[in-house]
Amino acid sequence: MATLLLLRHGRTTANADGGLAGRLPVELDDTGRAQAAAAGERLRDLPLAAVVTSPLIRCRQTLDLALPGVAAVTEDGLVECGYGDWEGQPLKKLAKDPLWPVVQQHPSAAVFPGGEAMAAMAARSVAAVRRLDARITAEHGPEAVWLACSHGDVIKAIVADALGVHLDLFQRIVVDPASITAIRYTPTRPFLLRLNDTGQRLAVPVPPKRRRGRRSRAAESDAAVGGGAGGGAVTAAEGTP
């Protein structure tokens, strides 16, 4: 079967400000544009059989910078989770919502008011990449490599499926902006070949310094809903994405 490269979009203005963009038309910031260009340096020599993207502008901007001149096909199945009423809200505010611990600890049961269920997001994104992978393999052969540009929670859900773990465990996975994750599907099982690869020199990610009165020990274990801005173990309770 073909090999899938999952590229998360670069950092956005919402990531930098600690907000949850959802499906709002937020764009890359200067850091995100630099991240996208750097990802392109790693991708340009690959013979990509196909490039697909979430319809949101931050993914299209990422591909325009990473792979200029390459035509990408829009795939609605890769769009960001529909966070509904949560969209555009600061994560530090959302961390106080009664739904927050459900999203963190039991995401398969989380349904965003006015939006989408996380389980529905996972199902349609996994179905999309498996359908596309089968088609690309049939058209280009089992040695084909193809790229999909999407969002943090979407990629985490696809990775969880590839690992054969329940969606309730997907918050243990980290997918940074402009990172590359590689999966190869086979007739019996997928193989996770690479995860959250940003091409940076190996360093030990350290949590930020604790600010007195700003975060609890419970919040230290919270995942960044929407994927966050990268750079280590940061939490919404600190006002970071």
Image (spheres, helix red, strand yellow):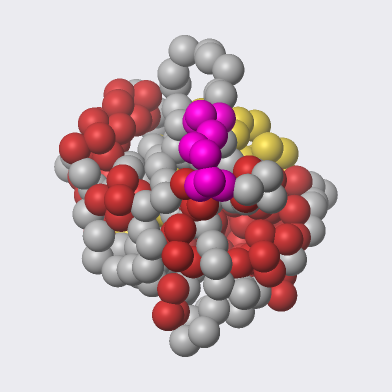
Q: Position of residue 94 (x, y in %)?
A: 49, 66
Q: Residue furthest front?
A: 213
Q: Is residue 166 above or below residue 1?
A: below
Q: Is residue 210 magenta?
A: yes
Residue 241, visible in the rendered structure: no
Q: Position of residue 192 (x, y in %)?
A: 68, 37
Instruction: State the residue at coordinates (44%, 73%).
Output: 86
Q: Position of residue 222 (x, y in %)?
A: 62, 50
Instruction: State the residue at coordinates (55%, 67%).
Output: 96
Task: Work out whether residue 68 or residue 179 is closer to the camera in this orientation and state it.
Answer: 179
Q: How many dots with numbers?
A: 0
Instruction: State the residue at coordinates (55%, 24%).
Output: 205
Where, by quadrant of the figure, is residue 167 drawn? bottom right
Which residues are the magenta region? Answer: 207-215
Task: Work out whether residue 146 or residue 16 is closer to the camera in this orientation and state it.
Answer: 16
Task: Work out whether residue 209 or residue 117 is closer to the camera in this orientation and state it.
Answer: 209
Instruction: Say left or right for 37 vs 201.
Output: left
Q: Position of residue 75 (x, y in %)?
A: 40, 65
Task: Work out whether residue 147 or residue 24 is closer to the camera in this orientation and state it.
Answer: 24
Where, by quadrant of the figure, is residue 190 drawn? top right
Residue 95, visible in the rendered structure: yes
Instruction: State the residue at coordinates (75%, 46%).
Output: 163
Q: Quadrant of the N terminus?
A: top right
Q: Main secondary structure of the magenta part?
A: loop
Q: Residue furthest bottom?
A: 114
Q: Is residue 21 magenta?
A: no
Q: Is residue 90 above or below residue 165?
A: below
